[in-house]
Amino acid sequence: MIVKKLLVTGSSGLIGSEVVTAFSGDGWKVHGVDNNMRADFFGPQGDTRWNLQRLKENHPAFQHHELDIRNRAAVLDLLKELKPEAIIHTAAQPSHDLAASRPFDDFDVNAVGTLNMLEAARQACPESPFVHTSTNKVYGDAPNEIKLKELAKRWDYDDPAYQAGIAETFRIDQSKHSVFGASKVAADIMVQEYGRYFGMPTCCLRGGCLTGPNHCGVELHGFLSFLIKCNLEERTYKIFGYKGKQVRDNIHSYDVVQFMRRFIEAPRQGEVYNLGGGRENSISILESFDLISEISGKPMKFEYVEQNRQGDHICYISNLAKMKAHYPGWTITKGLKITFSEIYESWLTRAAK
Ligand SMILES: NC(=O)c1ccc[n+]([C@@H]2O[C@H](COP(=O)([O-])OP(=O)(O)OC[C@H]3O[C@@H](n4cnc5c(N)ncnc54)[C@H](O)[C@@H]3O)[C@@H](O)[C@H]2O)c1
């Protein structure tokens, strides 16, 4: 039997590690690329080595490559050597707040690192599906122009056109993106271009809030994971603006990977999908406080800061219709309560070690 090879970048991170688990389970030979740069970005709280260790223990065939995707020569060599049958690119500087203090690193990792991966793939294995994790920040803060209504604990769209959420046709320019959003736009467009111009089977998954038990949530990235950790440790969570009613749609990393699987089985060229939890998995910060308190039995301690984060969305809900139309059968399987509970349990387990 021929064993297929998958290359996943950012393999020690939230999404990358879920990819390793899923594809190893399916019998693929999985190669991961990660240099633990999350610890460099976010300090010890962002260290992903515990996750790498967990992957090595659970999947003995998994092969880790301690490699920086900014190292163009090394990326070209690795792809030439492996010629993987599929590539999932999740390595990134993922925080829009952090990007402002390190614009060169942000752009070098997010934009140039993605180009390195694309060109290496084109030279080594242009037929292999290439899945890129983009972000809803490519829309900048333009979603804030949608008419909103204020409810008791959340904002919501007050425009029937957006009842099902924001679709992929939403405009991406002429709004404030944050430095991070801009570097991700560059990567997103390049991934589409390698699909359209070179005919490669690429796609961009424009993530809402991707979450799950294996996230190392920190204040600057991984909102739900960090919020739940604060509740567990009885620490004060800071709300930045919008009365704490800002809404995010959350998708469990398991459901993210189920979609990636389907794309790899039946790839298309230069596609774009808004990948979030949709309306059913949307929740505001205040509503999140209620849900986690219900699970943990602990009240949430918080402090309100008037100033919102630059370029932050007030209400963001992904429209999942295109994903479901292109890949019938794919759907969200993990609702908010189970996702919250899994994240909570994971922090408990990590704290006990
Ligand atoms: N988590 C979310 O809410 C969310 C939302 C939208 C989009 N995304 C996107 O999804 C992708 C994955 O996000 P995540 O939450 O799993 O992030 P993560 O930080 O948990 O994982 C990213 C991994 O990439 C590694 N990495 C960073 N720079 C690297 C480099 N130069 N070379 C090699 N490895 C490097 C990090 O060490 C980390 O393990 C990113 O592209 C992110 O922008 C995430």
Image (cartoon, grey):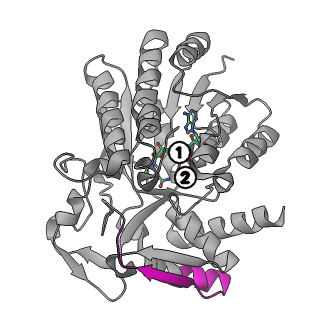
Q: Amino acid at mark 2?
A: Ser
**Cβ of mark 2 under 8 A from ligand 1:** yes
Q: Residue furthest right?
A: 353
Q: Is residue 299 left or right of residue 272?
A: right
Circle 1 sits on which residue? 257
> Do we see residue 324 in this rendering?
no
> What residue is at 33 percent from the left and 89 percent from the top?
152
What is the C-alpha distance between the residues marked 1 and 2? 6 Å
What is the x, y in percent for residue 275? 39, 51
> What residue is at 37 percent from the left and 62 percent from the top?
278
What is the x, y in percent for residue 154? 34, 80
> Do we see residue 256 in this rendering?
yes
What is the x, y in percent for residue 155? 29, 77
Classify 10 Å Cα crowding around label 1: few (below 14), some (14-19), many (20 and above). Answer: many
Q: Quadrant of residue 59?
A: top right
Q: Amino acid at mark 1?
A: Val
What is the x, y in percent for residue 47? 68, 49
Kindly state the secondary structure of the residue where label 2 is placed. helix
Circle 2 sits on which residue? 253
Please state which of residues 256 and 14 is positioned toward the viewer in this rendering.
Answer: 14
> What residue is at 38 percent from the left and 46 percent from the top?
180
Please state which of residues 253 and 229 is positioned toward the viewer in this rendering.
Answer: 229
Contact between marks 1 and 2 (CB within 8 A): the answer is yes
Kindly state the secondary structure of the residue where label 1 is placed. helix
